[in-house]
Image: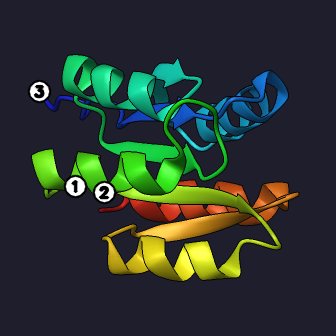
Amino acid sequence: MTTTPAPKRLLVVDDALIMRAMIKDIAQQAGWEIAGEATNGRECLDRYCELSPDLVTLDIVMPELDGVEALRQLRQEHPDAAVVMVSAIDQKEKLSECIQLGARDFIVKPFDRDHLRSLFQRYLAH
């Protein structure tokens, strides 16, 4: 008897409801389970501890605690956390900082659905 592996779990962090909905939809199409969502960096840190997701999509510009600082704190507390940053095209300097802080990848808004789906499929394989 073979058992199917449990689906990988995603935490989606973005202050824009429409962006969270789009990311969740594409992730689910690629075979991910949505573990949860958060609307700012503080919620992200709390939800990560609560849910232990396999991957986090983390927007850079958010209220209360931005994505860069949330990434910094998340990686300090959970060095193995897999994080993909989500940013607008004009945030290249911040993306560079995020890669240095340990972000695995990044998605530029507005994103291409096929590119995002292939990114999620690539992370399913790891």
Residue indicated by mark 3: 1
* Picture residue at 35% right of the left edge, 80% below the top: 100
Amino acid, disc 1: Arg
Assign a secondary structure to mark 1. Answer: helix
x and y percent of residue 124 in the render? 40, 53
With 103 as the anchor, is 91 left or right in this view? right
The residue at 64%/38% (across/down) is 62
CA distance for labels 2 and 3 = 43 Å
* Quarter where residue 12 is shown: top right
- Circle 2 — which element? helix
Image: 102 above or below 12: below
Gap between marks 1 and 2 measured at Cα: 5 Å
**Of circles 3 and 1, which is in front?**
1
Q: Nearer the viewer, mark 1 or mark 2?
A: 2
Question: Is residue 119 found left or right of 105 in the rendered image?
Answer: right
In the rendered image, the vertical position of residue 6 relative to residue 83, given as above or below: above
Residue beneath disc 2: 72
Amino acid type of the residue that numbered disc 2 sits on in the rendered structure: Arg
- Above/below status of 74 relative to 101: above
Tell whether label 2 touches label 1 (CB within 8 Å).
yes
Q: Is residue 112 left or right of residue 82?
A: right
Examine the image and state in which quarter residue 114 appears. bottom right
- Answer whether labels 2 and 3 touch (C-beta < 8 Å): no
Residue 12 in the image: above or below residue 82: above
